[in-house]
Amino acid sequence: MKTRFNILFMDEAWSFIQSLDEKIKAKVTFNIEKSREINDPELFKKLNKNIWEFRTKYANRQVRLFAFWSPTEKALVVCTHGIYKRTQKTPLKEIEKAQRLRNSYLNFN
């Protein structure tokens, strides 16, 4: 299958992934790769105008990795950070954090 986009992991996102249990890490990696090939909102969902999330559910745990599309590079998604989601609603402070990291990235590049 054709890859729809590439992914750049910011340090915090990469550290979060590396900290995961091996089975959860494998599922997260699988879902990220799958989302690069197919459009499935259960795997990669838009949260607001700029912020998206990679979604993984494993053993009743919800893992979320926040990301944004690079406006300067074609077909590049920048992953900002990750969390274990504990409530039904995505915490606003995490969306705001992703937005701050996006702004910082765009000002730096």
Image: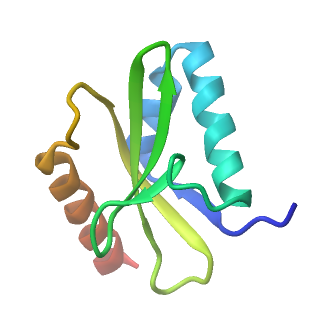
Percent x, y for residue 44?
50, 54
Report which quarter residue 67 is drawn in.
bottom left
| Horizontal relation, residue 55 to residue 4: left or right | left
Report which quarter residue 104 is drawn in.
bottom left
Report which quarter residue 106 is drawn in.
bottom left
| Horizontal relation, residue 55 to residue 98: left or right | right
Percent x, y for residue 6?
66, 64
Q: In the image, what residue occupies the spot 29% across and 75% down?
A: 49
Q: In the image, what residue occupies the spot 60% across and 59% down?
A: 7
Percent x, y for residue 32?
62, 46
Q: Quadrant of the N terminus?
A: bottom right
* In the rendered image, the vertical position of residue 73 relative to residue 45, given as above or below: below
Residue in front for this viewpoint, 90 or 109:
90
Residue in front for this viewpoint, 84 or 70:
84
Q: In the image, what residue occupies the spot 61% across and 83% down?
A: 74
Residue in front for this viewpoint, 89 or 85:
89
Percent x, y for residue 73?
56, 83
| Residue sitting farthest toward the left | 93
Q: In the image, what residue occupies the spot 27% across and 68% down?
A: 48
